[in-house]
Image (cartoon, grey):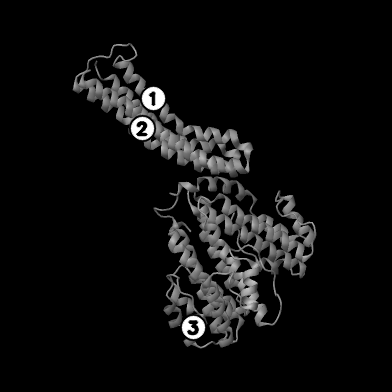
Amino acid sequence: MLKNINESTNTLEEYGYACGRIRDLEKYLLNKEIIHKMIESQDLEKSLRVLAENNLSEYSFEKLDSSSIDQVLVNISKRNLNLISEISPYPYLFQLFSWKHDFHNIKVLLKAKMLGKKELFPLYDLGNLSLNGLHAAVFEGKYQLIPIKIKRFIKQAEEGYLKYDSLQLMEVSIDKGYYETIFEQLEDINQDFLFYYYKTEVDLLNLIITCRCKIREIHKSKLAEILIKYGQLSTQKLIDIYDNPLHSWSNNFQKSDYFMVIEQGIKHWIEKNSLLKFEQMIDNYLLNLLKIGKYTTFGLECVIGYYYAKENDLKNIRIIINGKKNSLSDIMIKKYIRDTYV
Amino acid sequence: MSDGIILAYLGAALAIGLAGSGSAIGVGIAGTTGTGLMTEDPSKFGLVLILQAIPGTQGIYGLLVGFLVLTKIGVFAGSPASLTVKQGLMILYACLPIAIAGFFSAIYQGKTSAGSIGLIARRPEEVGKAVVMPAMVETYAVLALLSSILMLNGVEV
């Protein structure tokens, strides 16, 4: 995290107001103690009560059915996004963060279409594009309400599905569209930290994609098509090591910042046949990178850090809720939990 | 009016103008962050006000030196002294420490105050430490003020 502090850090005084507000709001982020108390609670109701006991009144769950809980969490996510729009001196952060929800919606709609269902998971009305527009584009082929480039991504993803007959590869194709959109916008914004953050995200995503492809024994020749460009890590390096045994991959990254993620992630896969640890290590790596925001008084790092920290809290709450609903043991839930920002 | 007195006026103007500008910027920086904090928690107004006011002192120091110059050259007495260029330059140079150090220290003090506002947002009980950090920057403004006063006292009019 500290290596990301450079001469451009802490120089954007226009973020002073935003940082002042966020310093107060950071008090209401979940810490490890609260997370552990929630996990160790006997049942879902008591677990959610921990939030109220710690003055986190934002998390007010009146009903405990899945849709009500999900609605509360979506509303918090919406408020988080609106806060960014309200406090940022420029509107680009709001747009940038909103794309994630648009591409999530595209994934859900396309998956539903491919599986012949009406809707699989809830759609989140948090993006830059209207849900009706996306629905019409995916199901009816009416693209008037969405930008041309989004139309291209949808068509590419559909073609990809027909070609590989794999929903996961279709998702990767949509992710490619997502990062193309993000990096196109980043060119205009020209903020070093944002570039660095998204490039790291792409690197880590490419690493896990390569690992998944290896596990599924997808041929090396297809990997170049699947991997996402824009990262710092050369995709050729990943293609080069692809034929090596999985357990030896980490040797090629010993001097890289990603060494621990790869080593632990692959080790866990070999021992437990699960990529859970890999995903968790990726999330923790990115969160750790964002922690620079806690030490910044004048910079968008503070705003980005808070936004993702809140999203991370929502993810952890969802993990605990699902764990409690499915009567998982405390130890099992702890395995899924991500690190905390504060 | 002699050339010397014009230089002395310039010195007083720089001391007041630059140190004052620095303070305005510093107070503005701290105030922006303070406003952000008070949007979420208005009860911290008192603490924020203290931290926001700290970078304002350089402006006062500049004004003090400016007044000393104007007193020395007899402006307030109604009969400005006739100064040589050498005397005028000495007064001008005497004003520079507070003008320059006042300008920059106020800006950096404003930034430190903004950081301290972030500290009291999360730990209001640490207000003492939060005040000490920007106060450290003040040291150099005080040294500059002393230098200016001592240099000014050394000028015989």
Residue B140 numbered tag:
none
The answer to whether residue A309 is left or right of residue A70 is: left
A123 on left or right of A200: right
Label 3 marks which chain's residue? A
Look at the numbered disc 3 and give the secondary structure of its residue: helix
What kind of residue is marked 3?
A: Leu
In this rendered view, identify the residue nearer to me: B48 or A142. A142
Indicate the position of residue B14 as horizontal and vertical percent values. 32, 29
Q: CA distance from mark 2 to mark 1?
A: 10 Å
x 32%, y 11%: residue: B78
Quick one: quadrant of the C terminus of chain B?
top left
What percent of the width, then of the height, locates residue A17? 53, 45
Q: Residues within 10 Å of mark 1 (few under 14, many from 20)?
A: many
Residue located beneath label 2 in the image: B18
* Secondary element at image label 1: helix
Mark 3 neighbour density, 10 Å: few (under 14) some (14–19) many (20 or more):
some
Residue situated in front as seen by the camera: B49 or B141: B49
Reading the image, the residue beneath label 3 is A223
Closer to the N terminus: mark 2 or mark 1? 2
Q: Are marks 3 and 2 in contact (CB under 8 Å)?
A: no
